Amino acid sequence: MGVDFFIGLFLATLIVSLFTTRLYRLILWYSMNSLVLGILALMVGKALDDKAMLITGVATLVIKAVGIPYMLKHFSEKFHFVRQIPPQIKTHYAIILIPAILVFTFYLSEPITHMIEGNANYVAISISSLFLSLLLMMEHRHVAPKIIGFLSMENALFLLGITATGGMPMLVELGIFFDLLMAIVVMNLLFHKEEVQS
Amino acid sequence: MFQFDTLSLVFTALIVLGAVPNLFYSHGYLPHIERKAHYRLHYLTFVFSMIGVVVSANALMFLLFWELMSLTSWQLILTEAKEKKTVDAARFYFLMTHFGFVFLLLFFLIATDGDLEIGFSAMHGIVSKFAYPTLLFFFILLGFLSKAGAVPLHVWLPYAHPEAPSPVSALMSGVMLKVAIYGLFRFLFNVLYPWPLEWGVVILVIGSLSSLIGVLYALSEHDIKALLANHSIENIGIILIGFGMGMIFGSMGLKVLSSFAFIAALFHTFNHMSFKSLLFMGAGAVLHQTHTKNIEKYGGLIKAMPVTALTFLLASVSISALPPTNGFLSEWMIFQSMLSSSHLDNTSLKLAIPFAIFALAMTGGLAIACFVKAYGITFLGLHRSSNAKHAHEVNGWMRAGMILMAAVVLSLMLFTPFYIGWFDKVLIGLGHLSVYAEIFPDGIWHMHSVGMHGGVVSPLILLGALLGVTALLMFGYKALHVKERIHRTWSCGYRTSARTQYSATGFAGPIRRFFGWLYKPDEHFVKESIEGYSSKFSDSHYEVHVKPLFETTLYESVAKAVNRISYWVYRLSHFEQTRYAAMIFNLMLSVLFSYRIFAHEFSWATLLLEGMVMLISIKILIIGEKQ
Amino acid sequence: MMLTLLVLPALVMFVASLIKHPKIKLLLPVSSFAILLPIVKLFMLPKPYAIWGDYLVADRLDTYVLLVSSLVGIGVTLALLTLDKHVKVTAKAYRRFYRFFAIFWVGLIFSILANHMGIYWIGLELATLSTVYMIKTNHTPAAHKEAWNYMIVGAIAISLVLFGIILMYASAKPILGEEAMQFNLLLAHAKEIPSPFLFEMGFAIATVGMFVKMGFFPMNLWLANIERASFYPVAALFSGILESAVIIGFFRFSKIAMEVNYAHLFGFVFVYTLLTIFIVAFLIFRAKDFMRLFSLSGVEHMALIALFWVSGGTFAALLHFGAHAFLKPALFLSTGVLESRGKYRIAGALRGYSGKKGELFWVVVSLFLLAIISLPPSPMFFSELYGFGAMIEMAKQSDHMLAMIAAILLLLILLSIIFYRFVAVYQSMKYEGEEVEKKVYASELFALVLFALCLLVLLLPVSFSYLRSIV
Amino acid sequence: MTAYLLTIFLLLLIAPLLLSFIKALKMQLLYKKPVSLFQGYRNFSKLMQKETIVSEEASVMTRVAPFLVLSPLLVTLFFLPPVVQGAFYVSFVDAFTITGLIALSTFFLMLLGLDSASAFGGMGSSREAFIAALVEPAMVLTVFSVSMMAGDLGVGQAGVNLAAHFPQEHTASFLFAAISFFILLIAENGRIPVDNPETHLELTMVHEAMILDITGVYLAIIETAASVKFVIFASLFASLFLPFGLQYDVPIAVALFLAKLFLIAAAVALIEVNTAKLRLFKVPNLLGIAIVFAFLSLITFYVLGA
């Protein structure tokens, strides 16, 4: 029950972040999104009492909800990002597109409803959030929002991992976190170079 | 891996007969080639790969050697790549042979179920189970005829053969084309047997067209090597006519006639190998003395280069199918087999074959005209350029090559029964009847057609008679002790000069004009007329060029199409620079949608829906509005 | 034990790259040689050999891929020694390059040897991220832009792969539990998967990710641009090693998908690769510089490998893979030399190499160029024969035979367009343009000769039989 | 055997006579004072006594070609059908060989024309080549249909068969074949309307242009060749298309045969008088007619059996 509510919140935050025109607002919505994800992880973990899942939840809260948004903000101050980020795709298109995506994903996952014991809609929602984050990436020209889109794609993955599969192996989740940090480091280096050059 | 049945051996013999004189010749030619190592390497590999093709016993080996053959011949064309023309010709040639290879590959893959090591006989079993044998037949046809240069896949020959060094063009035109004929024999007999009637008709039609078109375009050429290349097209056509007749008879159940026709085809294959190599050698010798391929710059070379002139004359007489040469004999056999079409119990076919006869006869007449032109303009009359004036006989090695090849021609003329016996064995090996006894019922003197009330020819008696009578006449002339006076040619009181005598273009003039509707020549005629008189002019220049048939219609249009498509693809593919995310989005959308439709439940309606959705989202997300 | 042996040289490389000493760069190829030894050892061991529990298992397939990749790595590092002769590069950039090269190796070893979808993905991501930085060693705005481009597109592709992996995992979890991530178990129990559609969806998404990463339709040009912008050894690494890490993943996933539903898998991959080759053929027809030409032909060959694999010609696919993995880096390395007189100059690029070294160089390069269009006796000739043979067999069994034969014919025609283009390029390199004196260095020659030898080894009957025995 | 040798000798002998007969008849018909019937022999003997002038541009070809022009025709003489029943004839030569031999002599004649670098020679050979190329197919097709009616391709045998029983059932195709063969006879021997042997006007010359600077004995040889060629064609026509009267005994049969020859010559003369020389590019139309008739005779033979 609660899980569904939070999943709804997750989707809502993602959709809202599609319409934001300010970078900081976007970062905020991303951290909200991650927060919801973390809470979800904790809830599901407690329900299944799965240690790994709990650790994941905590890690999500610490790294994604707080760490990465903070770092992004820090970067943007350090390297003077463009903070006006109007979406390139017109709003009325977006208004049609988003429900269309949702409908499509539910149509897509319709055959598997009777196949798996978990709720098939979770799969649908995570696929649709994958599409939505792709949409987020494609509607912005600047680098920073694209990064956020990529990060929220990561969130969609986690959502899938948490809800649909009821937790992945510990090792994999840690590995994913490790790669995430690696990505952040590389971005940092890239930004550094940019600064060196300009 | 390898097999040495009679067919393979006979074609190996053909390659050896073609290659050995050529070795001498090219050894003499070598000093004028800069990249000697490159030339030697590819030359030898070329010869060996040709032998490899004819002796290989499974598809893998066959394809390997076939490609090796194409590769080396391509490199050989590039041996003296000085100007752009050569490079383009080589590229075109390589593309065409690859085009053929594609179809051969498909044929082999279908015929072997993808296991390329199995022998040809095993392939027969697989093919007989295959549902569409005609498809395979057309694959083979495209594959081999693009190499053999039959119409309409002939366009590369007049470009590629002239550009190669002369020994190589002799090898390519004389021997390599025959390897394709070998392929036809091998796979039509061992794999695609039996044949429906239509296949033979198809080959017959292609052959007639090739022979006629080849000789017509040869007539309009004034690049001597291109002229000879066009003649190769013609002769391949003649061979195919024989082959087609054989197939027709075979599928109508007339075994004896079919063997006879196939023997005729094989015989002509050998003959063409001999005299075409000889002609190319002669052309090479001339070219190598005068440094030009333009026949209008030759003339009077018979005085400077007697050996070349004599051998070239022999080859010309033979290729024009004049008695008592070997060329005449094989064409005679092909004629005979066509005349035997009166045995067919299929009236429409009976009525159709005279047209092929007509084509072949016409070809013969035009070939005579063409070689009178080639020989007369090259070797007779006055020299038309200073190079031709200062030409002299080529070195010993090249002469040796030509003489050896002439010997091959003569042997084919003198020992016809022996060769026929050979070809007869080939046909037996391929499961046909033996007809040697019918062809030579009473000794080797008379050669009979196997058809009912067919003809007879006795080459040796004919040769003897001709030689005897000629000798007698000349002896008589000597005996008369006629006084001889040397005086300049009478030409209405003017002095004859290189400019007043007939040119090759002029010689072919009437025929070119008569067939203008076919050639569609582009003519350039400029003249400096004196104060407005159209008849009086101080200086004039006339020149005419003829493109191979089908070049503009088939080839250039294809090139245009490819260009246009590639242009559009190129433009479209640049969306990904900016719109990659949108592209991946649409990709995912279409893939998942299709999976949903095809993997779960399929209905055209949903498919249509998907199409519309995709179009809309591509329009919105990728293409967007015009700024 | 084995794992430490495998990873140790990479660590040595990493540490060495921290030392500021001009001669240090000579140590680096040595260390990349050192990677080869344990791999050869691994090659000798009986298969399957568990390196790290069920996570890293060495079987015939991945040891073969790993061996090929390590040989390529050696060649690349050899060529790197004289990188500064051809392009402007600082010692600092060198060291950083090697630092990330070490990380790249670690990621690669993990992803290739992985028997576990998660581990595979982690290794792949690590390798990808480290290559991002290798692009940046070239200090140009173009390289910077392309690095970002690669960062983002690569990230998208990789996350798609992970998404697919999770879906597949989800589909198989009810029967296998936590072990549902292991390839061998999945393969064994693929038939019992309760929700095949879910699995297929996962497979589709993962495959799309991999195909995007390999530069299939519609992302055909991005790899080319990246390789253009970065130093040429990076291009060699991409085509020689990273691609192999991706393709082995595709091999494994598709093997499972075959068990689940062969028809769907085949249809999907066939259509996709045909589309890719169509686009690529016409792009190649217009390509006007070496990098783009070679990377596009790399895409083409990858598509062929995938196609051969799914149509059952595993031997052909592996042979083609090996040949491509050696040929393409060789060509990319030689472009560095060929472009020493400015980019986009094809006419006469092969002329003017005099002396022993020069002769050897142009001969070897022209051999590579002719081998890439699968002229005999290049291994690609045989692999294509066998691959198309397998496809024809498929066609004969399928119930729309003529359509498939037509499709194969179309494929061959497209390949002959590529053939034509390469012939034209080769001819203009060798026979057009003007003759200008050029130089080539020993280390590059070593690399090229090494690749040539590997190709020759690939042609031996014994290696044929080995490849046949892999699957 | 004697009859055989005798006929050959006879044909050789009357060859010049026939041509001068045509000439005389034409002049008679044109109300001119006719030349003597023995003009041919006079020319021959005169030319034999003259010295030979060889062009300085000419090569060895000029010295060899005339013999090669004549000898195939002489050889052909030996292969003609018998004129008397039961006489010896050569059985091992068919119509193709004969067309080939004639083509051989034409080949060398054309080369001869090109040898002495004069514009006339080139022109002549070029025109001759054009005509010969178009004659060839008509020839072959005609031969084909005749061979089918005669039941043998060997000319000798064919002549005998036709004489033995005339193909009444195939009269139509027999007629067509005869027409086309007669056109060929005109074309091959360079008579009006294809060529005009009398004038030396460069617009009209074909055969004469080729031999324009051949003199003396060589010219004699060439002229002989021309007359022999006419005799060959005439006697072929006589014994293939007028196959009667062989059964009488020798003198009558031979006389009949000669009568046929002169009849043909007279026909040629009449045509020459009544038609104008065609322009070169009109000639194909005439030969086209020949080809069409050859096809017609084949088709009627096959389809109608008539």
Image (cartoon, coloured by chain):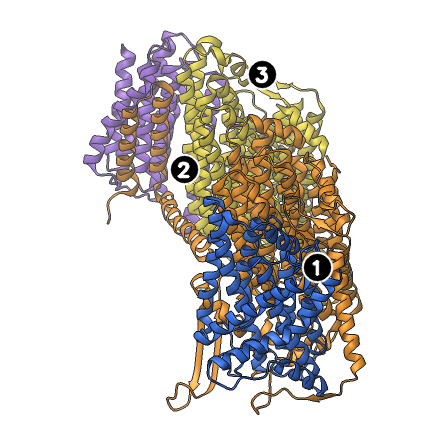
Chain colours: A purple, B orange, C yellow, D blue
Residue tagged 2: C152
Q: The disc numbered 3 marks a residue on which chain?
A: C
Is disc 2 surrounded by few (<14), some (14 to 19) or many (20+) residues within 10 Å?
many
Residue tagged 1: B325
> Could you tell me how many numbered marks the image carries?
3
Q: The disc numbered 1 marks a residue on which chain?
A: B
Residue toward you, D238 or B589: D238
Q: In which quadrant of the rendered view does residue C268 lie?
A: top left
Give the residue at x 45% y 17%: C169
Distance (Cα) linking label 1 and label 2: 78 Å
Spot occupied by residue C178 in the image (x, y as percentages of width and height)? 48, 12
Residue tagged 3: C54
Report helix, strand or loop for mark 1.
Answer: loop
Q: Looking at the image, is A105 positioned above or below residue B519?
A: above
Q: In which quadrant of the rendered view does residue A192 lie?
A: top left
The answer to whether tags 1 and 3 share a subunit is no
Distance (Cα) linking label 2 and label 3: 32 Å
Q: Is residue B23 left or right of residue D263?
A: right
Spot occupied by residue C322 in the image (x, y as percentages of width and height)? 62, 35
Residue C307 marker: none
Q: Is residue B262 visible?
A: yes
Q: Is residue C50 left or right of residue B353?
A: right
Q: The disc numbered 2 marks a residue on which chain?
A: C
* Three-letter code for the amino acid on which mark 2 is drawn: Ile
* Three-letter code for the amino acid on which mark 3 is drawn: Asp
Q: Looking at the image, is C70 positioned above or below residue B317?
A: above
Is disc 3 surrounded by few (<14), some (14 to 19) or many (20+) residues within 10 Å?
some
